[in-house]
Image (tube, rainbow, N blue to C red):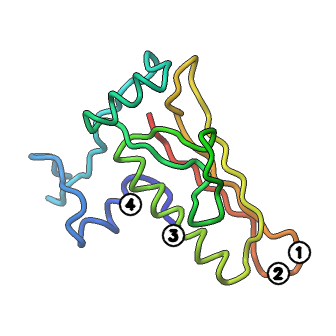
Amino acid sequence: MVRGWQELAGILLPLGGLATAPAALAQNGEPILMPPPADDFSAVTTRAAANKLVRQGRLVKVDYFPRELGGPEDPNNIGYITPEAMIERELTIRVLYLFLRDDLIDHLEVVPEYKGKSVVPARIRYLSRHSREGSGGKPYERVVEVW
């Protein structure tokens, strides 16, 4: 399970997915991975404003409840997240898909959490479990930080 940005980067760096910050080195000479600067999306209070940021590449339009896992095709299921959060979201979906395939989960709850009146969630919680006791699956929670 990927727990944070540094672990995610550790997985993606061998694949060429992320770069290190220039001149950021630990005392042992190893590169220090620096997360991208956090944007403040508190002023993005309409879908029109969010769609403008999508066109600029600062946000990505997604289905909150992933269609890959049975999410509905519904306007209320559409949200906006940063490209960095999209990477974590995709990894989370892959893990959840494997749990579903192996019958370790049969219930998923997706909870976007907002700050103020922004239409861009600050984070998205993925909570999964299996309704059958003794299924071998344990509850799994993953929080994707957006901003």
Which sits earlier in the primary sequence, circle 4 or circle 2? 4
Q: CB atoms at circles 1 and 3 under 8 Å apart?
A: no
The x, y position of residue 39, in whole percent, is 35, 28
Q: CB atoms at circles 2 and 1 under 8 Å apart?
A: yes
Tell me if 11 is positioned left or right of 77 in this view: left
Vertical relation: 46 (above or below) 138: above
Residue sitting at x 23%, y 52%: 32
Q: Quadrant of residue 43?
A: top left
Report helix, strand or loop for mark 2. Answer: loop
* Between 36 and 66, the one nearer to me in the picture: 66
Checking the image for residue 132, the label placed there is 1
C-alpha distance separating marks 4 and 3: 13 Å
Q: Amino acid at mark 3?
A: Arg
Q: Residues within 10 Å of mark 3 (few under 14, many from 20)?
A: some
Report helix, strand or loop for mark 3. Answer: helix
Q: CB atoms at circles 4 and 1 under 8 Å apart?
A: no
Which sits earlier in the primary sequence, circle 4 or circle 3? 4
* Between 29 and 111, the one nearer to me in the picture: 111
Residue sitting at x 66%, y 49%: 110
Location of mark 3 (residue)? 94
Checking the image for residue 135, the label placed there is 2
Which sits earlier in the primary sequence, circle 4 or circle 1? 4
C-alpha distance separating marks 4 and 2: 28 Å
The x, y position of residue 128, in whole percent, is 72, 61
Checking the image for residue 8, the label placed there is 4
Q: Amino acid at mark 2?
A: Ser
Tell me if 73 is positioned left or right of 52 in this view: right
Q: Amino acid at mark 4?
A: Leu
